[in-house]
Amino acid sequence: MESEEEKSIEIERGELREPLLERNRRRNTTSQLAIVGANLSPIESLDYEIIENDLFKQDWRSRTKAEIFQYVCLKWALVLLIALGTGLVGFFNNLAVENIAGFKLLLTNSLMLQDKYYQAFAAFVCCNITLAAAAAALCAYIAPAAAGSGIPEVKAYLNGVDAHSILAPSTLFVKIFGSIFGVAAGFILGKEGPMVHSGACIASLLGQGGSHKYHLTWKCLRFFKNDRDRRDLITCGAAAGVAAAFRAPVGGVLFALEEAASWWRSALLWRAFFTTAVVAVLLRGFIQLCKGGKCGLFGEGGLIMFDVNSAKVSYSSGDLLAVISLGVIGGIFGSLYNFLVDKVLQTYSIINKRGPSSKILLVVAISFLTSCCSYGLPWLSHCIPCPRHLEDKCPTIGRSGNYKNFQCPPNHYNGLASLFFNTNDNAIRNLLSSSSDGEFRLSTLIVFFVTVYFLGIVTYGIAVPSGLFIPVILAGSSYGRVVGTLLGSHSDLDGGFFALLGAASFLGGTMRMTVSLCVILLELTNNLLMLPLMMLVLLISKSVADCFNKGVYDQIIKMKGLPYMEAHAEPYMRNLVASDVVSWPLFSFSGVEKVGNILQELKTTAHNGFPVIDEPPFSNSADLCGLVLRSHLLVLLKRKNFTKQRVLIGSDVTSRFRAHDFGKAGLGKGIKLEDLDIQEEEMEMYLDLHPITNTSPYTVVETMSLAKAAIFFRALGLRHLLVVPKTPGRPPIVGILTRHDFMPEHILELFPQLNPHE
């Protein structure tokens, strides 16, 4: 007969098929690693639950009215600082991008005016590759977590997922400067996603209660040493990022509500609204300050605002059919875009695993491809005579404008150059302009759409900070303009409105947001009369795209392996109960435990929560006392509050410690197991765990359906959910559920006979 050790080895290798009832005894190792940037990192959950132990209760009861008032005022002050910081970063990003990209375009244009076309191409490519390589080097060597949009990571964090360096200071630094270099390098990407991530990083740094490492720990910030308050501040930071990127304060609040945050309440709504309002006022002040060329090449075009207010808004039933068609087209193109982005990301992940040099080479290759398209494709376009009675200057000699001269003779312009040989913001302005009907030929729009569509796909996923909003708006507005050009005089709407509706349809088809996108686009275009058509096209595009796949951010979260808890339970979870998926073996402590036992469990397991069981003589029978956290155990072990006898010393602990001593350290700089110095004689001593034990943890009975437990877990933002027996006379706890136990990979591994689609 085989030994137990041999059986366990064979089970780990998958050489034995256990009965279904025994499958839940395997350890859950799924979804505990995820891709952060381009690196594989361990994943932990955040503690959004209030830990009601003796120290917390003592601290809460002892707070004076002055301390409570101080806490409220500090929270509003931090929200104000988040708004000011995010607004400054947004202005600095736009100022730097407009000046760097403007210098590059002016240099190239001046060489072309001298008929030095090869030198102009060399200068254009060299500038782009240099900027791209700088952005890639920052991401590859300083902060790999800064690569990509950052919205999926922020969304996962607000759902309760903590990954290494997602919100670190180095990530913020690289996000700011990498985004500037990447956008200025001419990539088909935007700075909107990175702005959301930057706002979240700023909120995290301000809300972490100071830092022992940099000697920035203030007593007044001790209240914020918990994940619950940081979550609220980071939600405000994400909203501020959208407001800074689009000058859309209401859209920023709705984006945080609809897409980013997993938990919401009225107090958070007020703070988020205040944050975005301050950002909007700050940016308006900077725009006024920079008028008249006071900020170099940065002008009114620096902060994106696409004003289509000059066109008339009237439409017929035939126009409604065209709008419905745009919604269907956007849904199809959007779902295809998400599918191709997913495949490209999987391919790039293989390349990025080879090291920093491979990441930089990939970025340089995509930069060269983009530069060749931006400079080479306009040569295929015919020169078009400038329209008569035109208010704008034609051709445009400088860095921006609708009518780019490129290689054309005087009084002629190049349609493709007006879109390619420009910043992305100016290209969108040209497409949405109501006064440019007839400027772009049908072939020009089709070539631009195809190029931007596929360049946006191959660009997303390289090791630079990159947003998806601008590439999607570029592609959507171009095919919207195609529809407007085809309809021509048969429609009451002009080409600029069709471009706007095309952008809305493509955004709805890729991101699957409705309310926030609608408001953001209305704030961008400054035209409320387009609301009914905007709502219609977003609803249709989202409905069509949902038939094929999920939104792009949800796909990226899944591909990265982030254990995101959905608001709904999967249908197959109704066939299981809570005890079916708990992982074994279960490690627990006595209310007064031997130091050596605690140290041994901490060394041999990676668990962050342990049940505490009271046993005689401290109770009549084995009772569940509560749950104790690893971080709290490390604090007690570090301070060596030991006793030689197995006795209760709760009053001594509450007099020597305060609740903020057990607060979460900023950026994971807390006490580690390696920091402990436990002597041999101390291993036989005892530690009273009652003062730091959460005596009111959330529990569910073992027969509760897994679907109901999942909704309960997600709605309360838990890290640990204790499963207790239904019948008496058994051990007081069956197991602990964490977010990893609700992941489909874990459940379907335990029960492969389940159909995930039923």
Image: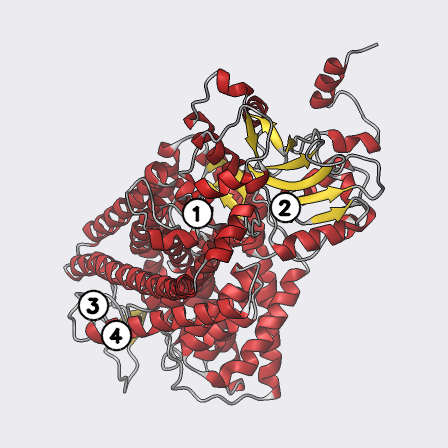
10 Å crowding of disc 3: few (<14), some (14-19), many (20+): few
Q: In this view, does 408 lie above or below 435?
A: above
Secondary structure of the residue carrying tag 4 is helix
Which mark is nearer the camera, 3 or 1?
Answer: 1
Residue plotted at (44% across, 72% down): 273
Q: Mark 1: which amino acid?
A: His
Tag 2: residue type?
Answer: Thr
Circle 2: is it few (<14), some (14-19), or many (20+) Cα within 10 Å? Answer: some
| Three-letter amino acid code at the position of disc 4 | Gly
The disc, 4 or 1, on the residue closer to the chain's N-terminal end is: 4
Q: Read off the residue under disc 3.
A: 398
Relative to the observer, which residue lies in front, 393 or 741? Answer: 741
Contact between labelled residues 4 and 3, with CB atoms less than 8 Å apart: no
Residue extending farthest to the top is 1
Crowding at dot 4, Cα within 10 Å, few <14 / some 14-19 / many 20+, comes out as few
Give the label on residue 695, or none. Answer: 2
Q: Distance between the residues labelled 3 and 1?
A: 58 Å
Would residue 37 be visible to someone looking at this image?
no
Q: Which of marks 2 and 4 is in front?
A: 2
User: How far apart, in angstroms, are the residues tagged by discs 3 and 4?
Assistant: 26 Å
Please say if the residues under marks 3 and 1 sit with CB atoms less than 8 Å apart.
no
Callout in the foreground (3, 2): 2
Q: Which of marks 3 and 4 is in front?
A: 4
Looking at the image, tell me whether mark 1 or mark 2 is earlier in sequence order: 1
Q: Which of marks 3 and 2 is nearer the N terminus?
A: 3
Q: Earlier in the sequence, mark 3 or mark 4?
A: 4
Residue 648 relative to residue 267: left or right: right
